[in-house]
Structures are given as structure tokens and as C-alpha cells.
Image (cartoon, rainbow, N blue to C red):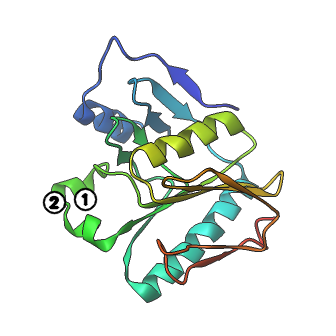
Amino acid sequence: MEALTLDCQSIELTDEQFYQLCNNNPELRFERNANGDLLIMPPTGGETGNKNAGINAQLWNWNNQQKLGKVFDSSTGFKLPSGANRSPDASWILLSQWDNLTNEQKQKFLPLCPDFAIELLSPSDKLSKTQDKMQEYLDNGMKLGWLINSQNQQVEIYRQGKQVEILDRPDSLSGEAILPGFILDLEAIW
């Protein structure tokens, strides 16, 4: 099932109202694009959920050793500078970004764009919409992002100021200078 998009531009939900809508409906996953449209995201299937858990575990384990930032799963909301509210499958921010947030900001949707984000394409996702989402992250300040398409065994790498790089069935991915020393093992993903 594909995400359902509701045109909410005439309603113009405030950030607080959107936050309350999400809290009042915890069984649903909402995102909001920069136009104010509400996106209702379907849950993932077991295979995608398992792969996503493995990706998050690898990222969390690396960060737990390095202590350079904070790791977030797919249930974390980010309020992007464009006004969109997004929830990447896995994401990371520098510790300095986290430390600059107030306690109240840490409790709600984080008012920033992740420095690093991963989207794992599930059978219910449209590739073009997920590519647009990755570009939206870049446009809002993401430094590095990976769109992992396990069905086609491809990875699209998004970097600031560079063309998207497409890799066919890589064994691993490097976090480059953004996540120094992080290597994502893709064996379980393929």
C-alpha cells in the first residue's frame, strides 16, 4: 500500500497541532511535506522492518563507540527548515546539534535536518517519491544520505554539492568524513 496524501493546505495545521495529531494517533505514521499536505505512511512488512532494524543497530553500535552524535529510528520526526516534517528510516546528527536543542525541543519533533539519513525502499514506496525525499533532505542541510533499494540491490548516495552516485550491489558503504569509521555491512540487506 502506498502512502496516502491529504491536501491540508486550507487547514494550515500549526506545528503544535501536527504534533498533537501524531500523538493522538500513535497507531498511524504521519509525515507532512513543505506544502502542508499530510502523508499517512503505511507500516512496513516484516522483511523491511527486520532489515531496517539491522541498519539502525549497525549505526547505533558505531555511534555508541564513537560518541560523535545521536542516532534516531524511523519513528523520530524532524521539522525541516522548509517546514516539512519527515521521518527517515535511520538518521544521525552531530552531538553539537543535539546539545544546542532545548529540553523541550528534544521531546518533540527535532527542529532541524539530520546530518545523515537512510531511506530503505520498501515494496510500498515509490522510488521517485523516495528520491524526492532524499533531495529534500539535501536541500535542507543533510550532508550524506543513502537510499537503499534492496529489491534492485542498488544504493543511491546523496552528498552536498555532488551528483547522486548509484552503486550496484555494494558489499558495504562508508560513512566517509561525515561518519568517520562507520561501515554499513549490506550482506543482510541483499
Query: Where, by quadrant of the figure, is residue 59 drawn?
Result: bottom right
Q: Is residue 158 above or below residue 55?
A: above
Mark 1–mark 2 CB contact (< 8 Å): yes
Q: Residue at x 84, y 51 (%)?
A: 152
Give the x, y percent position of residue 100.
19, 64
Disc number placed over residue 17 in the picture, else none: none
- The answer to which of 43 and 101 lies nearer the viewer is 101
Question: Given the image, on which type of amino acid does mark 1 rest?
Answer: Lys
Give the x, y percent position of residue 60.
50, 76
What quarter of the picture does the N terminus occupy?
Answer: top right
Q: Residue at x 27, y 66 (%)?
A: 98
Residue at the disc numbered 1: 106
Disc number placed over residue 102 in the picture, else none: 2
- The answer to which of 180 and 72 lies nearer the viewer is 180
Could you classify mark 1 by the number of other residues whose Cα lies within 10 Å: few (under 14), some (14-19), or many (20 or more)?
A: few
Q: Can residue 125 be spotted in the picture?
A: no
Element assignment for label 1: helix
Question: Given the image, on which type of amino acid does mark 2 rest?
Answer: Thr
What quarter of the picture does the C terminus occupy?
Answer: bottom right
- The answer to which of 49 and 60 lies nearer the viewer is 60
Give me the C-alpha separation between circle 1 and circle 2. Answer: 6 Å
